[in-house]
Image (cartoon, grey):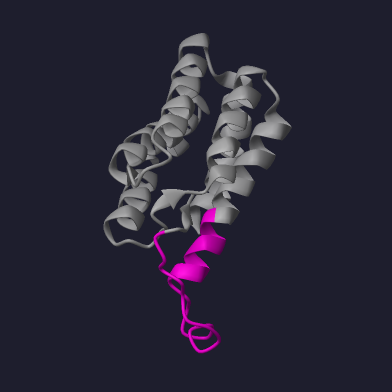
Amino acid sequence: MLRSAVEPVAAGLAARNADARQCAALTECALDMVATSRGHRLEEYLVHDMAFHRIILSASGNEMFARLGDVVAETLTGRTQHRVMFWDPDPEAVTLHVRVAEAVRGRDAARAEELTREIVLGALRELDVLAPSETSAHDEPADHAPAGRAR
């Protein structure tokens, strides 16, 4: 998946290259994700999640990564619109976004990359649960219960 290849590297670069304005905006997005992470507010959450990932890509300083903001936003939007996610974001994933913002602000490139890798791999695991591939579709049915979580 494109996200798992690009976003962790972009987060590490963002930790090296982000300016104070980008760090503040990233932190604000992460906190807004916390504020909209309960009560089935996925559309509101999505706005902040997309902005968070766009800032990471842009703050990386890599023009090619920055241009992938629309692709990542479409991926996140598609998951929401096609209900290939749970009703509320996974609290662990929300916390990981806050920690990524802290790592970027603290210029800890290795930590930012590690945490972002956890986010995208968690999203892939969630996708496997909600939309199993042909080979895993026969193992167990996906649970689309509203009590679940989204990354």
Q: Residue 141: in sight, yes or no? A: yes
Question: Per the image, is 133 magenta?
Answer: yes
Q: Residue 61 appears at what percent x and percent y?
A: 51, 25
- The one nearer the camera, 66 or 129, is 129
Q: Residue 87 appears at what percent x and percent y?
A: 38, 54
Query: What residue sits 63% from the left and 22% below the top?
Result: 16
Query: What residue sits 47% from the left and 76% below the top?
Result: 132
* Badge count: 0
Q: Residue 81 appears at what percent x and percent y?
A: 27, 56
Please identify the dominant SS of the magenta region.
loop
What residue range appears in magenta?
Answer: 123-146
Q: Residue 58: in sight, yes or no? A: no
Q: Residue 62 appears at what percent x and percent y?
A: 50, 31
Residue extending farthest to the bottom is 138
Residue extending farthest to the top is 20
Query: What residue sits 41% from the left and 41% below the top?
Result: 38
Q: Is residue 22 left or right of residue 16?
A: left
Quadrant for residue 10, please give it. Answer: top right
Q: Is residue 95 above or below residue 2?
A: above
Q: Is residue 144 above or below residue 76?
A: below
Q: Is residue 20 above or below residue 87?
A: above
Q: Is residue 115 left or right of residue 35?
A: right
Question: Per the image, is 9 magenta?
Answer: no
Quadrant for residue 47, please give it. Answer: top left
Q: Is residue 143 above or below residue 25?
A: below
Query: What residue sits 28% from the left and 43% below the top?
Result: 43
- The one nearer the camera, 85 or 123, is 85
